[in-house]
Image (spheres, coloured by chain):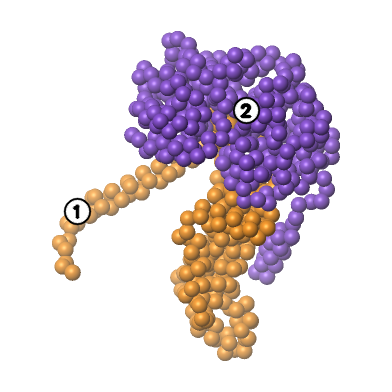
Chain colours: A purple, B orange
Amino acid sequence: MTKRLSLGLTASALALFVALPALAEDLRIFGWSGEMPDEVLADFEKETGIKVTFDTFDSNESLIAKLDAGGSGYDLVNPSQYAVQILAKHGKLAELDHSKITTYDQVGPTFKEVSYDPGNKYSLPYVWGTTGLAYNKTCVDQPITSWKSLFDEKYKGRIYMLDNMLAAYIVGLQVNGFSANSSDPAEIEKATETLIGQKPVLAGYNSTNFADLVSSGEACIVESWSSSVLQAIADNPDVVYVLPEEGGTMWIDGYSILTDAPNPDAAYKFLSYILRPEVAAKTTELTKTATVVPASKALLPKEIAENAAVFPDDATIKNADFILDLGDAMKLYQDGWTKVKAAQ
Amino acid sequence: MTPHRAMPNWFVRRFVYGISGWVTLLSYLFMLLPIVVLLAFAFNAGKSTVVWTGFSLKWFEKVVTNRNIIQALQVSLIVAVASAALSTMIGAAAAVAITRRAFPGRDILSAALAAPLVLPEIVLSVALLVFMSFAGVTLGYTTMIIGHILISIPFATLIVRAAASSLDVRLENAAADLGANEWQTFYMVTLPQLMPSILTAFILSATLSFDNLVMSTFTSGVGTTTLPLRIYSMLKLGITPEINALGALMVLANVTILLLVMSRYLPLILKTNRR
């Protein structure tokens, strides 16, 4: 028995060591979980015969760390706006050849001139959303329109903030009238004080089940990502999502081809595929996240196309800030955030 | 040392024994209650993990039909079995060498094998990632299995070493005396006695690998997203009962393995220890 067992184990271990990526046409994507539906990937595989491997990461930071180490083996990655800037600066992203993206004209004009990557040089925007606030109508007496409500004594112990440094600083900066992208040490310092001052009224920092909490009424007002509360809104009409009058922020997750991509042709085919209006519509329907393809809106069910949480109006979007690469100021944020988290 | 005054008997009986019982019970409750809640909400009909809306098995259905989860489970199992097998083999060989042979550098070897135990895992992981990319190795199964071996090898070595050092040398001497050569002695006398501890080391290593998150974060590559990595990235969209259902299945699998191993090997381990 011993002999057979050890032989079997040795054989299986050896087999794994020689297992290499298959040689058939492959596309390897490293992306956010839940932003690219399996159905779309399966349809793409069926249509093109290209086998897709889709791995997921948990944050832009771990994506950057992995790519910086080099030799990741992926073709396409899915960074958010500030991560595009950092990765492009590190020389990880290939310049996109727009002529190879056959459906490039489907991209909405506002998304072709995004400030973090003008002209979509390194990144093709795909899905986008906003960071604002969500509240439960049953526990507030008037509509909430401002970040200031997250500091209101009335809701003490029933307010949650996102447990994410950059997301928390959006509130800290904008409530003081600063840009969410500030790199001014004095402004960041003031925002840190504001966030520390907010702690007594907070029930906590939460970026996992805040939508649940606001739906059950356990929380009154929460700072929230638009995509995270949409299901709660569908289940419970008392939940409302708004972009605050101070602006809120907008995020875009796009696709970039790596400079060392083993199969850039398959990557271009994939990008051309997902920009088709019907594919974009399917993505929005399944993930409840808006895409950059305006033509897809007409193909969507009314309750999604007319949902202001998925598609905020243009004026609201104009008012929102982008979180960009903060460069050296990042250190100030990190120090401040440590103080905020340590404060009582 | 001055002898200290003995505590009265009633005090010991009432408080020390009484309290320690309660403390144990409460600690168990504290540790296990969250798991009970997790299991309960896996059967929730609604999408919430806070509000109970009714009984349903739909989340289990969702888990078993989710191709990403099944793929991640496959990766996790392959890495767990392979890394545990290798780490147990290396660990057992090292343990036998350290306890049975005197060779130069023995103390250094035994310390080096325990080093990953005291080094922060994240330091080890980053170092391995940097080394692998420096060496030009593509991240994937190979790098992740090597990483997991690093994590589990101290445990494998320690377990087998403890068993090896309690073996009776006279049995090996007797075998040699009866004409067995060194290999036969090892294969027919030493190894069978070590088998329970080797299997324990294997199971523990496999469990450590299966649960690992930090090392996997840094060493995973194309197509090798493990189950914990997948769950962690799913959290971005919030906790749904799907994660609870997956957790429930993992608890079930762990308990089953544990019971199987215990019913088969516990008597054997107890017998070995009694000698």
**Residue on which the image places disc 1:** B10
Query: What residue is rendered at 79% in x and 51% in y?
Result: A22
Query: What residue is rendered at 75% in x and 55% in y?
Result: A20
**Residue on which the image places disc 2:** A115
Given the image, on which type of amino acid does mark 2 rest?
Ser
Q: Nearer the viewer, mark 1 or mark 2?
A: 2
Chain letter for the residue marked with disc 1 in the picture: B
Depicted B49 relative to depicted A236: above or below = below
The CA distance from mark 1 to mark 2 is: 77 Å
Given the image, on which type of amino acid does mark 1 rest?
Trp
Chain letter for the residue marked with disc 2 in the picture: A
Query: What residue is rendered at 52% in x and 29% in y?
Result: A181
> Percent position (x, y) of residue A161?
46, 28
**Camera-nearest residue between A44 and B128:** B128
Left or right of B216? Residue A292 is right
Depicted B147 relative to depicted A57: above or below = below
> Percent position (x, y) of residue A154?
36, 17
Write down the quadrant of residue A302 in the picture.
top right
Neighbours of disc 1 within 10 Å: few (<14), some (14-19), many (20+) = few
Query: What residue is rendered at 62% in x and 51% in y?
Result: A69
Kind of element beneath mark 1:
helix
Kind of element beneath mark 2:
loop
Neighbours of disc 2 within 10 Å: few (<14), some (14-19), many (20+) = few
On residue A128, the disc is none
**Camera-nearest residue between B162 and A15:** A15
